[in-house]
Image (cartoon, coloured by chain):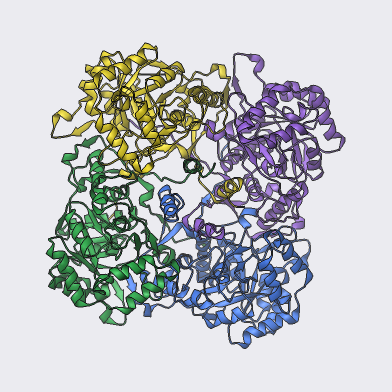
Chain colours: A green, B yellow, C purple, D blue
Amino acid sequence: MATITKKFTRAYGLDEIALVPSNRTLDMDLVDISTTIGGVKLNIPIIASAMDSVVNAKTAVELGNHGSVGVLNLEGVQTRYENPEGVLKQISSVSNAGYVELMQKIYKENEVKDDLVLKRIKEIKDSGAPCFVSSTPQNAIRFGKLAEQANADVFIVQSTVVSTHFITKDKSKNLDLSIFCKSMSIPVLVGNSTTTEVTLDLMRMGVQGIFIGIGPGAACTTRGVLAIGVPMATAILNGVAARTAYLEESGRYVPIIADGGIVNSGDICKALACGADAVMIGSPIAKASEAPGNGFHWGMATPNAVLPRGARINVGTNGTLKEILHGPSNTDDGSQNFSGAIQTALATLGAATIKEMHDVEIVIAPSLLTEGKVYQKAQSLGMYK
Amino acid sequence: MATITKKFTRAYGLDEIALVPSNRTLDMDLVDISTTIGGVKLNIPIIASAMDSVVNAKTAVELGNHGSVGVLNLEGVQTRYENPEGVLKQISSVSNAGYVELMQKIYKENEVKDDLVLKRIKEIKDSGAPCFVSSTPQNAIRFGKLAEQANADVFIVQSTVVSTHFITKDKSKNLDLSIFCKSMSIPVLVGNSTTTEVTLDLMRMGVQGIFIGIGPGAACTTRGVLAIGVPMATAILNGVAARTAYLEESGRYVPIIADGGIVNSGDICKALACGADAVMIGSPIAKASEAPGNGFHWGMATPNAVLPRGARINVGTNGTLKEILHGPSNTDDGSQNFSGAIQTALATLGAATIKEMHDVEIVIAPSLLTEGKVYQKAQSLGMYK
Amino acid sequence: MATITKKFTRAYGLDEIALVPSNRTLDMDLVDISTTIGGVKLNIPIIASAMDSVVNAKTAVELGNHGSVGVLNLEGVQTRYENPEGVLKQISSVSNAGYVELMQKIYKENEVKDDLVLKRIKEIKDSGAPCFVSSTPQNAIRFGKLAEQANADVFIVQSTVVSTHFITKDKSKNLDLSIFCKSMSIPVLVGNSTTTEVTLDLMRMGVQGIFIGIGPGAACTTRGVLAIGVPMATAILNGVAARTAYLEESGRYVPIIADGGIVNSGDICKALACGADAVMIGSPIAKASEAPGNGFHWGMATPNAVLPRGARINVGTNGTLKEILHGPSNTDDGSQNFSGAIQTALATLGAATIKEMHDVEIVIAPSLLTEGKVYQKAQSLGMYK
Amino acid sequence: MATITKKFTRAYGLDEIALVPSNRTLDMDLVDISTTIGGVKLNIPIIASAMDSVVNAKTAVELGNHGSVGVLNLEGVQTRYENPEGVLKQISSVSNAGYVELMQKIYKENEVKDDLVLKRIKEIKDSGAPCFVSSTPQNAIRFGKLAEQANADVFIVQSTVVSTHFITKDKSKNLDLSIFCKSMSIPVLVGNSTTTEVTLDLMRMGVQGIFIGIGPGAACTTRGVLAIGVPMATAILNGVAARTAYLEESGRYVPIIADGGIVNSGDICKALACGADAVMIGSPIAKASEAPGNGFHWGMATPNAVLPRGARINVGTNGTLKEILHGPSNTDDGSQNFSGAIQTALATLGAATIKEMHDVEIVIAPSLLTEGKVYQKAQSLGMYK
């Protein structure tokens, strides 16, 4: 008999879930939302993405001062241009039609310079802020050494999809993560993964933190162009399964960081409740008045000469970094005072720490666009008068 | 083996269900839609929310005259200002940009005054209308005593999420609901809860009515900011499970009141069919020409200095309180003649009382926005010409 | 233990299903789409709704000439006004604000007149077209007698929700359908039902056709106002279960007619594939240039003095009755040439008759509005330029 | 007891799935995206649809040069008009109101001419490009012979729904596919099918490739008008079940081609991961500056005199054929550089060939329009300011 053998399983996004209060609540004083990533204690479980529109040395310092950390991308404009401000201004003022071409030109014109890498890291370290830097797997050995040399705190190897078995004819292209982790004197974090198997393999290779998330980000078109993607809630659960299994087999707790599609404080709370130890966010930080993107946000795959991905979005500016991270909030849409929202959520849900937050009950509660809601909303917007 | 241990269960909202006729219908004369809450018989199962835009002493009196009841919030502008009309006018005329700041200023400038609390309660009681008043748990002891002193009928302790185990270093902050209920000579109602466990605990503590609902309201951004929320249909079912279990163990029937996200008569009917004894509504009453909000509606968490929640919505004015509650309706969208709609629904579904309504069959019938419906609707609105 | 006892079951709408071809197709010549309802053979399985905007005597005649049939509502404007054209023009030209009031006035001013009932039936019968007439249960005995007297072919007792057990103190209000069916010399059809139990009961009472459908219609706000409704695909399956069971116990085949929410030829085909013997449609016929509604369509519950339901929709005019029923079509949206579409669907699906169409395979295939589709559509509409 | 006997099963569309990375990735050099259809090796698994707006002899040649193939429809304007450019210009410039009438006139005025069929095939063959031609089953014998005579490489018999049992009184209308396949000296491909049974039957009749897909296409209104359609992901799985069963029983591997509703590179990748050996696409190719449709795209069922289907869509022009197929892409929406995207997807997913792509893990991950997403999107579009 001819039968279908391929099975699809259902995966859930953060948009589809909600958190359920228990019988316990906590006084805000008793809530601790700190987390430790790569041996660095962060007062708030938020890491700013390694993107040109989000983190330069100056914002990395400010993020550190606010108890967060920003990852400096060692292959972006900051390490290609002595004074990248002019180039960033061009990116935010070019027309949509000219955007991709401009990005390709900017990257082609200037290679990354070792002295600029060292200089940027020094700028961050000199301030006393934690310094997280990142590169692609292709350039990890070169930039890993520079990061060590400059005393960066954490080195991140990040690509759209991390592979534990990269097949190539050119062995020089192949980064052996086990050897790389052992060779590095500072913690190595790797991403992005979405499955239990890969995440567990990475932990066994000595990786000290894994970024979870492929496809769901606001400035990421991986899912449209390549069809690749795993909704975030399920991806985190997969990562948690690996973390638990690895903790049992090794006694070592390797944090996982949810990265992609997290746009407001509610999303952060959901990611933590699914089991994330921290979140990595881009567009919410790109909205800060201090962000290098000047109110714009774009992906790092755009300069790809052949298959550009990652749209440029006009995210605007909605407040200072301090307002976004610690408030006081002057909006009610979850785009400001992330630490206050996370603390309030933990207190309301009876979780004293992020680890206790992992145990919060979750329901599938899609806020689908039903007819009724559309009419209500449209009426309130004056659309259907 | 590494496996996923966290399970999500599906929760349903009122938007996702519909009511199924049985083989019985009733003459309207035989339908009784009264309900008893806190020992007070209400001719219609509708309670107006404890919000500044919905209930002042004058509307509480009118609501009582119409067989409903309005809850006066003892911590809002009515008990801070001798003549709150000016302040309410400011709220309804300030720009969106200035709204949050204004609210914080209004609350900071004027503390609640005991004599105004007593005066407002007296205004309601003098009319013969039932008087329900509310406060937060933090101030329950102070306002509970004042409410008793002024002969209020029911005292409500309401917070976003009610806790039966509030953990705090400062014991003075902790309200022991068991002791509080025993200490009060008038019935105490508490909210909001969404789970069977908490609801059952509250009943065992002596609470005489529980508000069910966290996160679904139109002027509430709890779900967006904090990710906390349980869709209403499932939340009510959870509450019913507690009510039934407690009735069996104690012989006492404790009513549950669905509170949040109920915007038209269809929603009210669905909440009753899920098992609610009454509903608490805000925005539909804020649309009354007599409502204190002057056509605007806002949440009570807005003045929060650090994490404002609760948007201000321009709901407009769609009729008198009488038209909204008892008709005749001059619209066909379920925003008027709630009592007529509830009576018609019960008659059509063959339910003689609200308790019989609890047994009506329910189907999951999401009125999702399918392509076809969008085109139809858009065409009828002249959008796709 | 406290547990949830109430269960929700999933019901499906026509929007959520699609029809699957088999291994057989048919030449169009071999397809017969006729159906027999109330002993009257219809060349096409389409009945026009008993609504003022859809059927008057003149369109009933034309519908009959086209192999369909129109139901004349004996309680609408046609039997209240000698010359209803003026009143119909008023309805189509009044403002939205004045609409409900106008409808209530039109109905209050003029009672139904027996001589007009007889005259309208005669106008239809004189043409040779089949004459189906309808009334509410309250007036069934009076209008049933008049219909018999005037030689109508079929008498329809229709209300939003048909009850087999109507509970009332006033016995005179109660229509015993068993006695009524026996007392009538012409077939009696009844509606609307959505459950197997009620449909089976009605068949046992001698009803010769059942209208299936509560809540899904375009000009019907029953679901919004009263929350009552069963998605059509599931409602038809329920009716089919009754029809099959009754056929087995009695040897009598009682047709079921899907009524509500059917707006294009695809919907008709889906209803037939679910098991309907015919469909009743309102808005698609109201779009005919000959329709009495002058490009508008409205429900019959609107004149209800207390709880008006049924919006007035500007449906426009998209062709002649002949084009809508038999083409040729000059559009490609399924709003014209219903008979051609039904024949093509049956031929394509390998069904020679409507009864064979009942066996076609159906999949759940929601054409949900996914992000991708919205962008595509919006782009093709020039919305996102 | 009366019970429901008809069961609905859930079918999935490409919009509802996403692809999951494994633990393996590949260097791009190691990825081979070629496929063999009808004995012809294609460097990229893309076939351009047999539609007047997509393929004429000139684009067929260019598609061949780019490693793809275009199917020439032998019954469209190319074989009716010596110089079809004028007619194509009329189609792209007529008003929407006049479109259907014009199409019917164009087809009625000029019959297909044998010498033009031979001439068009020669134009393609002379260039060295592969030549795929198609006709309806009704005319397969006539055009099949002409195709053989002119040395076409593959002959395609395509209708909306392919039948293995066509019932007709007029035996001359009936194409016996077994006999036809045997009679033809060149490979015969057939479509469209969606079920395992029909696909398996066709393979047993000697068909050398099956087109899978009914109802999902952008310029196809089959689902709206006739309600017929099977979401593509499930349809492909059905076809794969037949391919596997037939391979086991016969040792012959018959490729299946996903046809319909595929609009960007992500969709192509999903179809391949479901098990397709190639995809057939229309609208994405109609956007090429070389496409005969001049920026418009329309279905081939439109000229149907009685029941026109297939809307004309203004798809615009987004690049050259080379840019669409091989890049470099200057957009990030998956509408360009299909080969680059497919290669990148395979490399990222660790699949070295299209056959390995068939084994990629798939999750159900609907990118449903949730409230949050709509607001985000709308804000980024400036709609809700």
C239 over D302 or under it: above or below: above
Q: Residue A188 or D97: which is nearer the viewer?
A: D97
Q: x, y percentage for residue C40?
A: 78, 38
Residue situated in front as seen by the camera: B216 or C382: C382
Residue D140 sits above or below residue A266 on the image: below
Q: Is residue B13 left or right of residue C334?
A: left
The answer to whether residue B131 is visible is yes
The quarter of the rendered structure image containing the N terminus of chain B is bottom left
How far from the left and from the top, in percent, is residue A347? Answer: 22, 40
Q: How many marks?
A: 0
Q: Position of residue B96 (x, y in %)?
A: 38, 42
Res. B251 image quadrant: top left
The image position of residue C255, as x and y in percent, is 69, 38
Q: Quadrant of residue D25?
A: bottom left
- Please tell me which residue is depicted at 41% across the width and 38% down the height of the picture: B313
Can you see residue B10?
no
Q: Kindly identify the residue that appears in the image at 14 percent across and 67 percent down.
A: A186
Q: Is residue B281 above or below residue C363?
A: above
